[in-house]
Image (cartoon, rainbow, N blue to C red):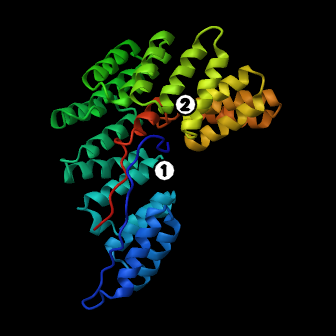
């Protein structure tokens, strides 16, 4: 799932293996150029610069790594993987290399392939809390709850001031359908870290799943008091209204506001689609659901609702295709779930790897 919350701005620097006497002004100009490209998000152009440098310095590890990183940021996951594997021997002991390889494989849905580099980067750099969070999140995706729990507990002992290590066990409890236990876990995090927005997000989400609309609404208001522009807070208010009789119009207004604040918020897109389906506007629901699937292709609920919407507009062929996609995800070991997707989007679990300097 694409990040819809805070992510780190990553700067790639051009690190060619220059021979003695080659540190000329054109090389410095090239470095400045690629930094400017990265800073404005033109990863395709940065890739072309790295490719041109690699033509002069074939096999250079740092250039290859940075080109793989540019490919990763541009969404070319297969290209990024292939570049990394071409210098695997040089990268064996490099934590940034292993982190990028693990992130790319995870994003491609190759969770089993991502496991080895995720473990290796943790061994190489155990002082980085994000390496522990990355491995725990990967175990969650693989539905290895006990493994994830062990990583969260070890991480909490090492990093007692990182609330993510307390939220993680709640995610596991929720995935195990122990909603009451998860709610208390999340509530405890809000009490220990009263300014941690993600704790309120998870608490509100669990309360919605438990059908506790009033408690979810109260949680959403606390979140919005912390951050008046919280898209997730608006979404939670919308879901609480959706669960309450006679408040469907209110739910629609909050979904609209949530998407105004964050057009990529999958939960809000799904709520907007439910509102449109209930209002007899299946074509508009199709639009919202297509956007949701573009953001998070492996969220099974999106495909199920899209099947319903296509059926209502009379497109039975597309409805059947979406229903098949839903069933395939339901049976898949590695399917994404909406809660986990949001957890991985908190901006701290899956951090973008840093460039080689």
User: Is residue 12 at all visible to an observer of this figure?
Assistant: yes
Helix or strand or loop: what does disc 1 sit on? loop
Residue 329, position in %: x, y?
A: 56, 34
Q: Residue at x 35, y 41 (%)?
A: 349
User: Is residue 82 at all visible to an observer of this figure?
Assistant: no
Helix or strand or loop: what does disc 2 sit on? helix
Q: Residue furthest bottom?
A: 21
Residue tagged by mark 2?
Answer: 267
Q: Residue furthest top?
A: 245
Image quarter in which the C terminus is found: bottom left
Seen from the viewer's position, the closer of residues 310 and 159 is: 159
Residue 298 located left or right of residue 176 = right
The answer to which quarter of the image holds residue 304 is top right
Say if mark 1 contacts mark 2, CB within 8 Å: no
Q: Residue at x 51, y 65 (%)?
A: 42
107 lies above or below 73: above
């Amino acid at each position: 799932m694409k990040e819809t919350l805070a992510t780190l701005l990553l700067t790639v620097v051009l690190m060619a293996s220059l021979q003695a006497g080659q540190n000329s002004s054109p090389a410095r100009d090239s470095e400045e150029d690629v930094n400017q490209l990265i800073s404005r998000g033109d990863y395709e152009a940065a890739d072309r610069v790295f490719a041109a440098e690699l033509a002069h310095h074939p096999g250079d590890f740092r250039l290859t790594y940075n080109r793989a990183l540019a490919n990763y940021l541009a969404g070319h996951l297969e290209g990024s993987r292939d570049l990394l594997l071409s210098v695997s021997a040089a990268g064996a002991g490099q934590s940034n290399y292993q982190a990028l390889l693990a992130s790319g494989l995870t994003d491609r849905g190759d969770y089993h392939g991502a496991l080895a580099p995720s473990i290796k980067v943790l061994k190489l750099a155990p002082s980085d809390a994000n390496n522990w969070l990355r491995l725990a999140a990967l175990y969650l995706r693989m539905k290895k709850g006990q493994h994830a729990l062990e990583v969260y507990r070890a991480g909490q002992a090492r990093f007692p001031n990182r609330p993510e290590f307390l939220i993680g066990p709640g995610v596991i409890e929720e995935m195990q359908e122990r909603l009451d236990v998860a709610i208390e876990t999340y509530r405890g995090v809000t009490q220990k870290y009263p300014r941690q927005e993600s704790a309120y997000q998870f608490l509100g989400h669990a309360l919605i799943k438990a059908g506790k609309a009033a408690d979810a609404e109260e949680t959403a208001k606390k979140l919005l008091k912390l951050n008046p522009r919280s898209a997730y807070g608006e979404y939670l208010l919308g879901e609480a209204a959706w669960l309450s009789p006679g408040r469907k119009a209110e739910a629609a207004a909050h979904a609209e506001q949530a998407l105004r604040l964050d057009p990529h918020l999958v939960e809000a897109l799904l709520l907007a689609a439910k509102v449109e389906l209930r209002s007899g506007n299946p074509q508009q629901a199709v639009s919202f659901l297509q956007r949701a699937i573009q953001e998070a292709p492996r969220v099974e609920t999106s495909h199920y609702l899209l099947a319903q919407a296509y059926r209502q507009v009379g497109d039975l062929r597309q409805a059947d295709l979406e229903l098949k996609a839903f069933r395939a995800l339901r049976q898949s070991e590695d399917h994404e779930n909406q809660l986990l997707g949001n957890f991985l989007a908190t901006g701290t679990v899956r951090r973008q790897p840093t460039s080689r300097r």
